[in-house]
Image (spheres, coloured by chain):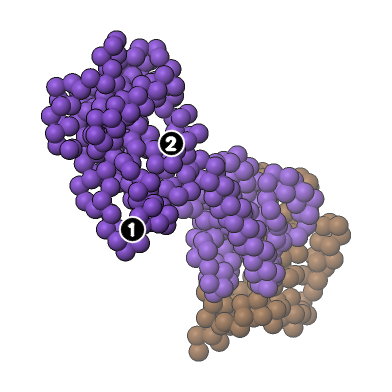
Amino acid sequence: MKILIAEDDNLSRKMLEKTLCQAGYEVTAVENGDLAMSELDKDEPPRLVLLDWVMPGRDGLSVCREVRQRSERAYTYVILLSSKESKAEIVEGLESGADDYLTKPFDVEELKARVRAGERILDLEDRLVEARESMRFRATHDLLTSLWNRGVILELVSREIQRSFRENACTVVMMCDIDHFKRVNDEHGHAAGDEVLREVARRLQHSVRSYDMVGRYGGEEFLVVLNRCEPASALARADNLRSVICGKPMRARGKSVSVTVSIGLALSSDYQNADADEIIRKADAALYAAKEAGRNRVRMARPQGEMHKPVEKAVALEGLGS
Amino acid sequence: MGVEQNRSLGVSTMNPQRNSASRANWDIKELLERVDDDREFLCELLLIFRRDSETNLQKAKAALRDKDLPGLVRAAHTLKGMLRNLSMNRAAEIAYALETSAREENCAQTESCLAQLELALAELLPEVEAQLAEVRA
């Protein structure tokens, strides 16, 4: 564990440094509060800090207050060092956010014990943060595929569509459905079906840009959202996803399984001021049309009565997919 | 408390027959325990002490001359910490009395404490040198 020592007295600093190094800690020792702050501003800063109260420039108390104001960072455990007469100040020190204090001259065993106590608290904090992150992940992701779950992807679609209206850009909403997924389950078992779902998710996720979004909409249905997308390239990008899935068989439970998807897409720029639900419905209807047309193909929703009619390019793409 | 202590310390400092008492004022046994009997490290600390105690004493004297009491408090505080770390207990108590009297802006007391501290440090130096020689031998 990394420990920072901020102490202006060279002798005391040396003794603290030596003791903690010998105890196996990774120690950085600085001589004033300003240097302490710059150490704490670095990436992966020390989690435990020994701060001398009286230092030139920023004193221990100011450093402590500043550390506590930065709530976005991982918890820093602060031990204030003060001389034995300043017990009254200890209250002030603890009030300003210090976790513990140590009076100088320190006793080696006491110092090590207090540092270990700090380590226990930090360890507890790490475990709590981990648990919270895991809960947050579970609340927002689909557990099987690790994609965004339905609730989150719907929220994201809505936000992206609103933004594209504001910015006069285009958001592409794609509904992708695995063709004959029931057959995969029936022929290879549910475990293989799960592996196929995971692999489809992985391929979709890897085939879009880092700022595009992929979510699991339902059983074997995925929602892909491409933001700031050129309307002219939407079909080609959808077809790229289609071919990424059918291009290579998947391994599931040691067997090779060929899987295809049908994709229906809708462009926000074709439906000015429509809400997300409506655009998703359009994409869903286009998906239905793709299924009707024989599966493993892409259909784009067209506004004003032209719905699902394959545009010229789509006809060409359809040929690729059959 | 600081004043009382200081007065008694003042008397002992003036006592000419205090050669052996001086050794008692530096608890080397306690210090060696603190550094886990690491003589090399002790040597390192004493070298820091030799340099920093002089620097801080000069700072304290300059602060007194310039009537810079906060500066004097800081120098005395540092000296106190250093002396306590090295178990130089009597000198540490004088440094503490100096810090307190400077903080209380008691000029007469401050002046007397500083003189005593200078003397106490001067008495410690030969012992420090002796320790250094012993470790190096």
Q: Position of residue A191 (x, y in %)?
A: 42, 57
Say above or below: A300 vs A190: above
The reply to whether residue B28 is visible in this rendering is no
Q: Which of the pair B118/A301 is nearer the observer?
A: A301
The C terminus of chain A appears in which quarter of the rendering?
top left
Say above or below: B114 vs A214: below
Q: Amino acid at mark 1?
A: Ala
Disc 2 crowd, CA 10 A, few/some/many (<14, 14-19, 20+): many
Q: Earlier in the sequence, mark 1 or mark 2?
A: 2
Give me the residue at 24% from left, 34% from top: A294
Give me the residue at 39% from left, 41% from top: A220
Q: Are marks 1 and 2 on the same chain?
A: yes
Task: Look at mark 1 in the image and give the residue it sits on.
Answer: A252
Instruction: Please identify, in this view, whether the residue under mark 1 or under mark 2 is nearer the observer.
Output: 1
What color was chain A assigned in the picture?
purple
Q: Residue furthest bottom?
A: B137
Q: How many marks?
A: 2
Q: Position of residue A271 (x, y in %)?
A: 34, 14
Q: Which chain is brown?
A: B
Left/right placement of residue A316 relative to residue B19 reads left
Q: Secondary structure at mark 2?
A: loop
The reply to whether residue A81 is visible in this rendering is yes
Left/right placement of residue B2 relative to residue A21 reads right
Task: Look at mark 2 in the image and give the residue it sits on.
Answer: A217
Give me the residue at 21% from left, 41% from top: A243
